[in-house]
Amino acid sequence: MTGELIYRDEFTEGRVAYGIKEELLAADTKPFILGLVAFGGSGSVNWQRLSTRISYRIYPDDKEGRILDVIVVPDQRDKGIARRLVRIAEKRMKGHGVVRVFGLAQPDIWGFWQKLGYKVSSDNEILKEL
Ligand SMILES: CC(C)(COP(=O)(O)OP(=O)(O)OC[C@H]1O[C@@H](n2cnc3c(N)ncnc32)[C@H](O)[C@@H]1OP(=O)(O)O)[C@@H](O)C(=O)NCCC(=O)NCCS
């Protein structure tokens, strides 16, 4: 099962393309899903150049998800792309039975996570109940 591709999709919204890939992996004996949503710019997703993306881990046994990173390249910021990436990731996680999403965020982007409905704590942990 290690590294098994379990989901792959590419779709466009307007002229903007997004790609989703999920692999089934195992940490010790616990299975987890590693997911990646790529922003492809206009028309198509270039999986080799994933500069704008979100990645997440899903622990189906615990019904928990963890956002690992969200990155939007500077010249694409403030267009709602990160919001869209988070929404897609949340939808995927929910589809796998996730009820709580965690992550880590430095104080300079707490405002971003709060706008997306996340609670932020002083140890930089973000949390949202889906
Ligand atoms: C944080 C980051 C992902 C935001 O990407 P983005 O595509 O510009 O964000 P969006 O346009 O989707 O913003 C959604 C909302 O959050 C707000 N927002 C974005 N960045 C923010 C910040 N740093 N602080 C407060 N609010 C912020 C936006 O104004 C917008 O609000 P609105 O709906 O009221 O207009 C991007 O700035 C980035 O890649 N930063 C560097 C990497 C990083 O720190 N990643 C996160 C930790 S892994």
Image (tube, grey):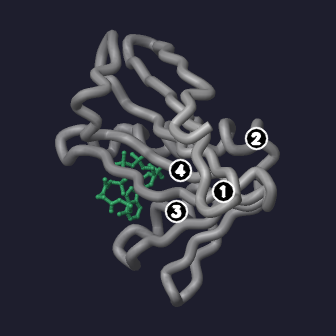
3 or 2: tag closer to the N-terminus? 2
Q: Quarter-wise, where is residue 128 in the image?
A: bottom right
Task: Report the Cα–Cα distance between label 1 and label 2.
Answer: 9 Å
Q: Please name whichever residue, 100 or 57, is drawn nearer the observer in this view of the structure.
A: 57
Q: Determine which of the numbered discs, if any, sits on residue 96 in the image.
A: 2
* Displayed-image quarter of ligand 1: bottom left
Q: Please name whichever residue, 70 or 65, is drawn nearer the observer in this view of the structure.
A: 65
Q: Determine which of the numbered discs, if any, sits on residue 113 in the image.
A: 3
Mark 1 in CB contact with mark 2 (< 8 angstroms): yes
Mark 3 in CB contact with mark 1 (< 8 angstroms): no
| Observer able to see residue 87 | no
Q: Determine which of the numbered discs, if any, sits on residue 93 in the image.
A: none
On screen, residue 79 versus residue 66, left or right, reads: left
Q: Determine which of the numbered discs, if any, sits on residue 65 in the image.
A: 1
Give x and y (percent) for residue 78: 33, 45
Would you name the residue on which mark 4 appears? 56
Q: Residue furthest left?
A: 75
The amino acid marked with disc number 1 is Gly
Mark 1 in CB contact with mark 4 (< 8 angstroms): yes
Say few, some or many: other residues with alpha carbon within 10 Å of mark 2 (under 14 / 14 to 19 / 20 or more). some
Q: Residue furthest bottom?
A: 122
